[in-house]
Image: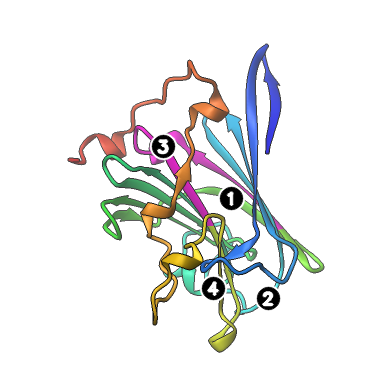
Amino acid sequence: MLNSVCNGCILLTAMEFWIRHTWDSLPVDHEPVKIRFSPDEEGLRMEVTAPFFNDPPAPAGTPGEPFPGLWDYEVVESFFLNSNTEQYLEVEVCPHGQHLVLLLNGKHNAFMQQLPLSFRASIEGETWKGEALLPWRYFPQGINKMNSYAIHGSGAGRTYEALYPVPREDLQEGQGPDFHRLEYFQNFTLQSIMGEDWVQPESDLWNSVST
């Protein structure tokens, strides 16, 4: 879903997505997680509205700080990919205020992680909301694909959800969730939000990485 945003007479766009399926294409049994991306001069603004399960309990980290292994808790994640180079940004946010940012050069190959992030979260009854600003320097050039995920639950009740799940016909016996199945990411560009003439700033974090 697209929403127009006026910023100094330049028409920009906000995009909204709903996670309606588990990683293996089954419908979720609760209100879907909503993720909204909107423009900012300093980066991409990411807003999350999601059911609050409080399962697992909060990680033992300080709210507002990176937390390694955050994917083992209740999280919402977004991945931004250049499919030509398999360079991508992974952002994880938690209802309790912790976050995790990873830069990956190749599938599963994180060369930088636990980067700082401006992120705040709040819990209101059975819903939580979070807002993060993803700096442009975290994005590799040429983003053309995206996927988002949500995880909650413990033990046998652990639930993995995907905006773009693995199709049922592609599932194999014994297969489990893998959020780095880059072939299932779908089309997405930063220019679709910032405008076709927008030029992505250079990144000191990515400039030294070989493709």
Report whether 210 appears left or right of 143: left
Looking at this view, is 2 or 105 the one in front?
Answer: 2
103 relative to 20 in the view: left or right: left
Disc with the residue nearer the chain's start (4 vs 3): 4
Question: Which comes sooner in the sequence, label 2 or label 4?
Answer: 2
Q: Earlier in the sequence, mark 2 or mark 1?
A: 2
User: Disc 2 versus disc 1: distance between alpha carbons?
Assistant: 19 Å
- Name the secondary structure under disc 4: loop
- Residue under circle 2? 54
Secondary structure under the numbered disc 1 in the rendered image: strand
Residue 1 point in image, percent of width and height? 68, 39
Kindly identify the residue that appears in the image at 64 percent across and 52 percent down.
120
Q: Residue furthest left?
A: 210
Q: Marks 4 and 1: in contact by CB < 8 Å? A: no
- Residue beneath disc 1: 119
Q: Which residues are magenta?
A: 129-148
Mark 1 or mark 4, which has the lower sequence index?
Answer: 4
Residue 132 within the magenta-colored segment of the rendering: yes
Mark 4 highlights which residue? Answer: 73
Residue type marked 1: Phe
| Residue 122 located left or right of residue 202 | right
Residue 41, can we see it?
no
